[in-house]
Image (spheres, rainbow, N blue to C red):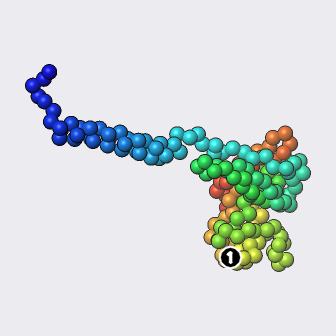
Amino acid sequence: MSKNRVTRRQFLTYTITGVGGFMAAGMLMPMVRFAIDPILQTKEEGDFVQTSQKAAEITEVPVKVDFSYEQTDGWYKSEVSDAAWVYKEGDQIVAISPVCKHLGCTVNWASDPTHPDQFFCACHAGRYEKSGVNVKGTPPLGPLDMFEVSENDGFLMLGKKIANTHSN
């Protein structure tokens, strides 16, 4: 037996400190895991979504293509519906987002009788050229976003939104 005897007070101090440490670790580990888990998950960004639109049927006149994809927010999965205006420019397929850059309303092709060859936002009279570039003097300050485009088995595939590459 050692000559340094542990007093009752020291024993309780060591015991309470040890138990408290284990309890603190038990509470902190889930918090650390919660904070680090999203960083460790693989990103699925850049995946293409197949639409029901056949690539061969796309013409020079923009047509609205509706599509949906599964979105994961944390542990919640939901089905998200989206749309794109799609047309051919030469031999290239162009897909433009229908979301107005002014306030997020939806734009439509040829819906303004005075400007039949433009996209029109009925909310605040915003106008865009066929390429998605905003018309000067109307509320939108920037061009409509574009989608990455691909083709698979004859069907149109749409990817993530990218900045519009057309200029005035």
Q: At x 13% / y 30%, what residue is drawn?
A: 5
Q: At x 73% / y 50%, what residue is drawn?
A: 69
Binning the other alpha carbons within 10 Å of mark 1 as few (below 14), some (14 to 19) or many (20 upward) gives few
Disc 1: which residue: 138
Which amino acid does the dot numbered 1 rest on? Thr
Q: Position of residue 147 (x, y in %)?
A: 71, 53
In terms of secondary structure, where does tag 1 sit? loop
Nearest to the observer: residue 2 or residue 57: 2
Nearest to the observer: residue 100 or residue 87: 100
Nearest to the observer: residue 64 or residue 60: 64
Residue 164 is drawn in which quadrant?
A: bottom right
Residue 23 is drawn in which quadrant?
A: top left
Quarter holding the C terminus?
bottom right
Q: Position of residue 18 (x, y in %)?
A: 29, 38
Task: Tell whether 139 sits left or right of 56.
Answer: left
Q: Position of residue 167 (x, y in %)?
A: 67, 61
Residue 129 is drawn in which quadrant?
A: bottom right
Task: Tell whether 153 sits left or right of 144.
Answer: right
Relative to 98, is 55 above or below?
above
Q: Position of residue 54 (x, y in %)?
A: 87, 48
Q: Residue furthest left?
A: 3
Q: How many marks?
A: 1
Using the rendered image of the protein, determine whether residue 39 is visible from the camera's viewpoint.
no
Q: At x 87% / y 55%, what residue is drawn?
A: 59
